[in-house]
Amino acid sequence: MSIAFDHNNPFPSRRSATYAKHGMVAASQPQASQAGRDILAQGGNAIDAAIATAAMLTVVEPSGNGIGGDAFALVWLAEGAAGHGRLHGLNASGHAPQRLTPDAVKAAGHAEMPLHGWTPVTVPGTPAAWAELSSQYGKLDFATLLAPAIRIAREGFPVSPVISQLWQRAEIEFRAKADDPAIAPWLEAFTPNGRAPRPGELHRNEAQARTLEMLAESRCESFYRGELAQQIDTFSQATGGYLRADDLADYAPEWVDPISVNYRGIDVWEIPPNGQGMVALMALRMMEGFDVTVRDDPWLLHRQLEAMKLAYTDGHHHITQAEHMRTSVDALLSDEYAATRRALIGERALDPRPGQPQAGGTVYLATADSDGNMVSYIQSNYHGFGSGVVVPNTGISLQNRGHGFSLDADHVNVLAPGKRTFHTIIPGFLTQGETALGPFGVMGGFMQPQGHMQVVMNLVDFGLNPQAALDAPRWQWMGGRKIGIEPGYPMHLVREMSLRGHQMTVAVDSTAYGRGQIILRDPDSGVYCGGTEPRTDSSIAVL
């Protein structure tokens, strides 16, 4: 006889920060962090561990990412025991197919980019990210890194509680669209028993296991210039898609120079546009001009909300693929522009408007090894399972990143063939001078820069350890003067924000408030201190 129990936790949960000397992997699923830890134990480095963890996450957390998504990474390569080294950025976001034009979308009856189906599907960058990271900086054989994910996809895994919840939501969405021949395979792949799996139920995906084997054997070439590319092309043509084999063959990830601002002596790093990491940096630049004392201060919370609203409004107006931007990154992050935007923050809530500077569900993981190498890595299908398009007999769920494009010809982020859209997923990293502190990130669509700002301030301004910085309640700007806030905030703050003109809603579901990981390294001892997200089924594995 077994004990029947509720998979929800009715009580506030307390976790301690996690410490380790020889390596650490923080991820949103225990089997994923364990896969990365095992790779470290086999002699792999932080880059190898990140790839193994990311591959496993496509299996055990399909509600937020998959083989058919995009990825970004910040990679710290250590040079000596003092924590010195260099930070590298990888942009593995995909571009719009050549046949996907505003005219084609409008001719199909859409006034704006749809969320599901073939139209929002862009070229996936995740497999290319794995191969590129391994080729440039990995130590172990590529096939070794994917072996754990292949095994778990074939043997099956018990679905975790939060993922089951998100899976059930997706089933409702896609079952209503089961008549679409492009979406019908989603139900076959992800509801094999006629429904989404419940917490603790085993889910197997033999098709994904075979696909991962092909990626392992070909170092992901099959996805872009081989059998898998042809399968994607064939299904796209048969079901009205725009993606073709030549779009896949033309794709390559791009190494980029990370961008940063100095916030009270700490350098905060992000991927440059087309990513939205700059939103977090702009908000921090505004906040640096204010005195910060205690966390639960009404003036502080009001200013945080206003700074994020202004930064986000600028981001949506100005950010797209770098070469298509009409305003420079330097101008948006300049002292002068930060001062002009900061000056708009008064006592009452604003309806934000973009400024004019001078011209000039996602998964997140963090890894670290005994040599001081560290990786901040994020990959996503964008909206949950993505477009709902699953290539039959492959387990490849394709992203819907193209939903971010505009069909307005005058908008900076207007759709164009071969163009990368404004991108929500952003890895973060902290340094001090020439010394690495470590990777951090908060996954969750447009919550991400808001989570970055709040986590950085928790660490830098309020001295919270990595676990406490993630445990702390969060707020979220939801457009206009609408603010969502988690119930952990004192109610007098919520009332005070309402009096200042913010339209406050206390959240009953924290899954929309981001899910993050943090690993920080003590430069003197080399000891790692990690925190993992309490809002999902996450864990830290150490060596």
Image (cartoon, rainbow, N blue to C red):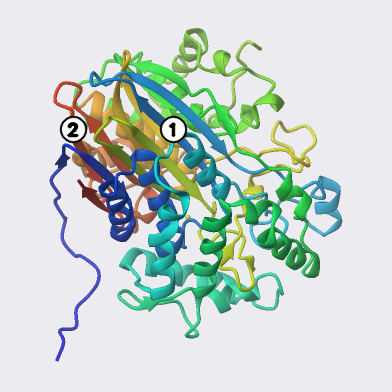
Question: x and y percent of residue 172 in the render?
Answer: 52, 73
Question: Which label is found at residue 363?
Answer: none
Q: Secondary structure at mark 1?
A: strand
Q: Please tell me which residue lies in front, 394 or 237.
A: 394
Q: Is residue 525 left or right of residue 287?
A: left
Q: Is residue 484 visible?
A: no
Question: x and y percent of residue 258 in the render?
Answer: 49, 24
**How many C-alpha atoms fall within 10 Å of the one at disc 1: few (<14), some, or many (≥20)?**
many
> Above or below — where is 164 with respect to 250?
below
Dot 1 corresponds to which residue? 74
Dot 2 corresponds to which residue? 464
> Above or below — where is 101 with respect to 387?
above
Q: Secondary structure at mark 2?
A: loop
Please name the residue shown 24% across and 49% down the image.
540
Please name the residue shown 50% across and 16% down the image.
333
The tag earlier along the polypeptide, 2 or 1, is 1
CA gap between label 2 and label 1 equals 23 Å
Q: Is residue 175 left or right of residue 151?
A: right
Question: x and y percent of residue 34 in the render?
Answer: 28, 55
Q: Quadrant of residue 387?
A: bottom right
Q: Quadrant of residue 404?
A: top right
Q: Is residue 314 visible?
A: yes
Amino acid on which disc 2 is placed? Leu
Quadrant of the rendering where the N terminus is positioned? bottom left
Q: Please tell me which residue lies in front, 448 or 438.
A: 438
Amino acid on which disc 1 is placed? Leu
Question: x and y percent of residue 143 in the render?
Answer: 46, 55
Q: Is residue 160 left or right of residue 145?
A: left
Please name the residue shown 57% across and 27% down the image.
314
